[in-house]
Image (tube, rainbow, N blue to C red):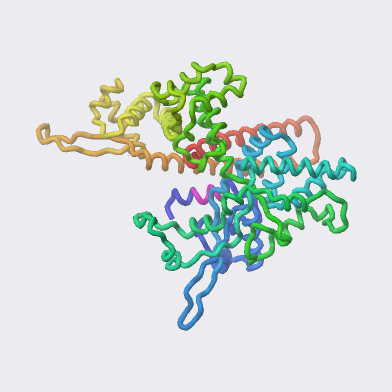
Amino acid sequence: MGDKEDYNWHYLTQLKMRIHAHQKVCECLLREGTLSLAQVIRFTQLSKQNVTNALLVLVQHNCVQAFTIQLPGGFEEEPKIMTQYMALHTNIIHHMRFPKFLAIVSKEFGEECKEIFEGLLQHGRLSFNQIMDRHKDKHKADITNGENSTAANVLHENFNKLAQAHYIERCPAHEPFLEPPEQGAKKRTSKSKIADAPPTLEARALAAATPMESLRFLVDVDTLSNGALEDDSKNSPATDIVGEKRKHDCLEPETDIWATNKNKEILWRVNFEEFVRRLRQKFCVSHVTTSLDRGAGIVLNAIYEASRKEETKVKMETTVPLTMDTILEETMKSEEGRSLKLDGVKASLVQLGCEVSAIDFDSDTHSIDLKKIIDQAQSQEVESIVLKKYGREAYRIFRALLKHETLYETDKISIDTFVEKKDVLKILLQLLKDDFVQMERLGNEAQKMDILLWKIHKRSLWAQVLDDMYHAALNLKLRLVHELEQAKDILKGKAVGAEVVQKRKRVGEKWKVLESSLMVLDDAIMLFHDF
């Protein structure tokens, strides 16, 4: 494994994992890839019980997906069924983004929905009854017997809001069975594309585990009716609400499906995909507002709102096509949008890349090139890195190379950027040393010398920039851990006095600065990895 891969798995483990007791198992899966239970035990040198419990809790917190495969048996032996475990890298990363997700829910739906959502973030997977038990335990001092029914109805309503917004979803199957490749191949239809590379084992497992789209966000009436807040002797006591009860539910190994718990109740979890989509939308709106103007941001936001339920994936290259009437109607729903009027909306659409001729026809549909917005933002991010690291002349040269896209001669770069040729060459060689540019030599027999040609390979450079961000994030996290370790005596101590209070204040301020820096860096990581 190379240095870049080392940083990636180490970043994922150290920066994102909050399930501290099970870090060793998670680290093993991140480093080694998909493994069986026996292999995890061998690599970690932990007991079978410890590994089993760790895997179960990691599954509970949506950090690991289990699946079963059929292995060929030995001579005259039956095929064997084996359970495999794979780390969900992206989900592990999302654990650090919980504050961002929580802020979205709080802003859109308020504190009551936030409380439900917070429970799912904290416990990973819960049934509706467990959510109700948690609510009952938290508010037992405030809710009287006569208010139970009202409280239950409010909880039902808020739960439905989260499901309808796709912020929560039914949990995937615990251990989907994957057919052997030869059996799967027989089921290929004539429409299958033979040229396509076959999906990986991990991709097949995730696809098999995911509930059908028609069921993924469906809240059954039975699910809600079984969860009334009643003071019944059959209900579990308040002390058994989501701690031991949830743990007992999740520690049932080798069940057929983990979309339900031991009571056959449907389990729910946070839908990370929807939050990444919302953060991407928020980023695009913010970017066009900054790079174009406020009106463009308002119109793009209106387009997102009008087509929210029609988006099929996170990385949409264009917005869903909408008519002018639909865009105008959605824009006018906000006070800011009403200030634009019809001409303002049309002008913003032109800024966003729509053709002027098409805008004048109300029957035509319009869509915005989102890939172009993301590409532009990524380029600006890398340009800012070059500016800070190498200076303004290097920044001008780098921008010229990005725009040129093809091989660029040294003399031409000097002319176009108004930088002396000797300085251009010096800067380019420094950029070449750090892998920001690539160079090719072209022989010139007449002048008996080589002509140097330069270009930027965006894909490899963007990957390198992302890896550097992982490295920086790891260093920030390690600094956070170090500062906390150094200050634990001050924070936990019972000593009082002006000096102690001042020390605690300084520790808190330093922690906030580091946390804020980490969140800003994570925004950049999302731009290159998730958007």
In the picture, measured across the screen, residue 2 lies left or right of residue 256, that is left
Q: Is 292 included in the stretch rendered in magenta?
A: no
Task: List the single residue furthest toward the left.
Answer: 446
Displayed quadrant of residue 406? top left
Magenta residue span? 8-12
User: Measured from the top left, where is residue 172 in percent x and y?
Assistant: 60, 55
Q: Residue at x 45, y 25 (%)?
A: 352
Most foreground residue, 93 or 263 = 263
Q: Residue at x 77, y 51 (%)?
A: 225
Q: Residue at x 47, y 20 (%)?
A: 346
Most foreground residue, 209 or 515 = 209
User: Measured from the top left, where is residue 344 in percent x and y?
Assistant: 50, 17
User: Measured from the top left, where is residue 3 in percent x and y?
Assistant: 44, 50
- Residue 179 lies, with reference to residue 228, above or below; the image says below
Q: Is 9 included in the stretch rendered in magenta?
A: yes
Task: List the single residue furthest toward the front.
Answer: 363
- Residue 439 lies, with reference to residue 244, above or below; the image says above
User: Measured from the top left, where is residue 329 in percent x and y?
Assistant: 56, 25
